[in-house]
Amino acid sequence: MNSHPPLRTNRRRHAALLFGCLALALAAAPAPSHAQETTDQRFDSLFGAHEPYRAFFQTLRTAIAKGDAKGVAALVSYPLSVRIGGKKTTIANAAAFERHYAQIVTPALRRAVAEQEYDDLFANWQGVSIGDGTLWFSGVGDSQEVRITAINN
């Protein structure tokens, strides 16, 4: 006599277990907040899609938090006008940005980016602002690739 349950019963158990795990995973996944949905809708309305802006914001926050000069430099639309030593300076390319990283990405800028929540970003036809206009990003060029367009340091 075979002591194993029929194969059909095992499949049902596995399907039930799989279904249960899937239900738990979906229940545990955080639902987007109302504020996040509102921000997404505003970006969709202004820029046609929110996903590139949300992804850019997360990439920027991570790069600045890590002090990744090369990573932040890759997110900039050049040339970029900034203040270095109180003087207006034009940063022509990523190499120049990396050389002046500490003077451009100041403690105040790092703090503004770290404290900024996606749900609270200000946006208008010009782009998206972090802090009180400390940093702006927007879609640039024909491809509308999202880049840093201004740093008011």
Image (cartoon, helix red, strand yellow):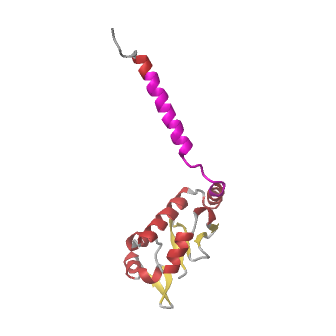
* 41 shown above or below 95: above
Q: Is residue 3 visible?
A: yes
Name, please, the residue furthest toward the bottom.
86
Quarter of the rendering containing residue 131? bottom right
- Does residue 5 belong to the magenta stretch? no
- The answer to which of 15 and 122 lies nearer the viewer is 15
Question: Residue shown at 52%/77% (left/top)?
Answer: 109
Q: Is residue 142 visible?
A: no
**Quarter the N terminus occupies:** top left
Left or right: where 75 falls relative to 51: left
What is the count of numbered marks? 0
Q: x, y (%) of residue 66?
A: 41, 69
Question: Residue shown at 51%/41% (left/top)?
Answer: 25
Question: Residue shown at 48%/72% (left/top)?
Answer: 77
Left or right: where 80 falls relative to 131: left
- Does residue 32 belong to the magenta stretch? yes
* 52 shown above or below 124: above
* 129 shown above or below 47: below
Name, please, the residue furthest toward the left.
1
Quarter of the rendering containing residue 67? bottom left
* 118 shown above or below 7: below
Name, please, the residue furthest toward the top.
1
Q: x, y (%) of residue 49?
A: 58, 56
Q: x, y (%) of residue 44?
A: 62, 57
Q: x, y (%) of residue 2?
A: 34, 11
The secondary structure making up most of the magenta span is helix
Span of residues in magenta: 11-36
Left or right: where 77 falls relative to 35: left
